[in-house]
Image (cartoon, rainbow, N blue to C red):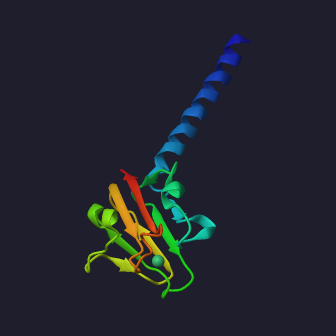
Amino acid sequence: MASRSNTIVAAAAAVAVVLAVAASLPAAASAETYKVGDDFGWDIGMNYLDWAQGKTFKVGDTLEFVYSSEATHNVALVDSQGYDTCTAASNAPTESSGDDTVTLDKPGKWFFICSVEGHCQSGMYLAINVEE
Ligand code: CU1
């Protein structure tokens, strides 16, 4: 009797170990896609630092910037100085399709702004930390 219930406990423990390993292994491979601003998208009128608050971005994840028209906004990847001053250097990688995806392919700080005149100053900036 006792030995039989011990076997069941041992089997349950083994299953738990297998599940834990299975859950931890694909973590690096299961990249997330984050739609910036959720349903609001990429536009004037949202605090994107608030949006990013509480999210954990990891290498391999993707940001998707959605906005109504390519003439309306853009997405420029800038450095900390460009971020602080709301200016995109002429060689800053910039997308303007209206549905722009950026794969976060390295850890560290990532800075995005809309470089259309006045838009960054009106709140279209995002800084995130990407974890290994
Ligand atoms: Cu804009």
Residue at the bottom extreme? 71
Is residue 126 shown left or right of residue 42? Answer: left
Question: Residue 7's quadrant in the figure?
Answer: top right
Q: Position of residue 77 (x, y in %)?
A: 35, 70
Q: How many circles with numbers are drawn on the protein?
A: 0
Front one among 60 and 108: 108
Q: Residue, x 61% and y 69% (percent of image)?
A: 40
Q: Residue, x 45% and y 75% (percent of image)?
A: 119
Front one among 78 and 25: 78
Q: Position of residue 32 (x, y in %)?
A: 51, 59
Question: Residue 23's quadrant in the figure?
Answer: top right
Q: Position of residue 48 (x, y in %)?
A: 50, 61
Q: Position of residue 61 (x, y in %)?
A: 45, 61
Front one among 63 and 20: 63
Q: Residue, x 56% and y 68% (percent of image)?
A: 45
In the rendered view, would you say 74 is above or below 83? below
In the rendered view, would you say 59 is above or below 119? above
Residue at the right extreme? 1
Is residue 58 shown left or right of residue 47? Answer: left
Q: Residue, x 52% and y 55% (percent of image)?
A: 50
* Image quarter of the N terminus: top right
Front one among 50 and 34: 50
